[in-house]
Amino acid sequence: MKTPALTARRRTTMALTTGALALTLGAQLAATATAAPNTDRAAADVVAAAKPKFQMPFACNTHWQLNTYDSGHNPALDIVKKGNPGSSGLAVYPGYKGTVAKTFWDRGAGNVIIIKHGGGWYTAYYHLKDRHDKYVKKGDNVKANTKIGRIGATGSNSGGWAHMHYEQRYKTNGIPTEANRKPVHFNGKQYTGAGKVWTDVVSKNC
């Protein structure tokens, strides 16, 4: 026969055990809920840390205007000389060492060059004035100040005005496309966000 005291002790023990189990399960669920966001942030931090210190794709100490336009264009940049007093024909450089991954003609983008910089990072240059392989060809090694082309207005998407459409891309396997565009950094500073304009950015590609 069970005494009232023994029954009470067993009930207390069961309540404590159930409470401890609930706390353990709650902690596990909380850890599971936060694991994915933390992992995503950690992965993004690793990618950012490995990004080359890109400089502007133009001559040292020249002044430029950067535009992101709308969300469909951002994070790509359209770049013209400050005030746009004759951007056509000005020299274009990679802004960081690398290897020419691809050069081609595209109906919308015109003459295009894609450069591989290592670690999954690439840069893309659209609307070049001269034939895409005039200055460099696939497989060529380039430095930050190697001339790869000139600003132009080729391709139907240029709108007929000379400017540099520029992108920084990241992909670990294969040549990235526009779907792999990332926010642009020059000299460690980020230039991104729909509808943004920077009217005077100095190239430190020196």
Image (cartoon, helix red, strand yellow):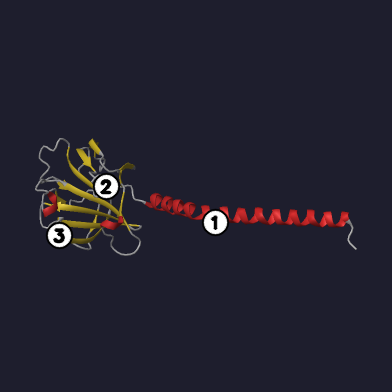
Residue 71's tag is: 2
Q: Nearer the viewer, residue 90 or 179?
A: 179
Q: Is residue 187 above or below residue 6?
A: above
Contact flag, marks 3 and 1 (Cβ < 8 Å): no
Distance in Å between CA atoms under marks 3 and 2: 22 Å
Front label number (3 vs 1): 1
Residue 172 falls in image quadrant? bottom left
Residue occupied by mark 3: 106
Q: Which residue is mark 1?
A: 32
Which residue is found at the position 19% from the left and 49% from the top? 165
Q: Nearer the viewer, mark 3 or mark 2?
A: 2
Can residue 57 be seen?
no
| Residue 55 in view, yes or no | yes
Amino acid marked by disc 3:
Asp
Coordinates of residue 72 in the picture (x, y in percent): 24, 50
Rounded to the nearest whole Å, what is the CA distance between mark 3 and mark 1?
46 Å
- For the residue pair 101 and 182, the one nearer the viewer reads as 182
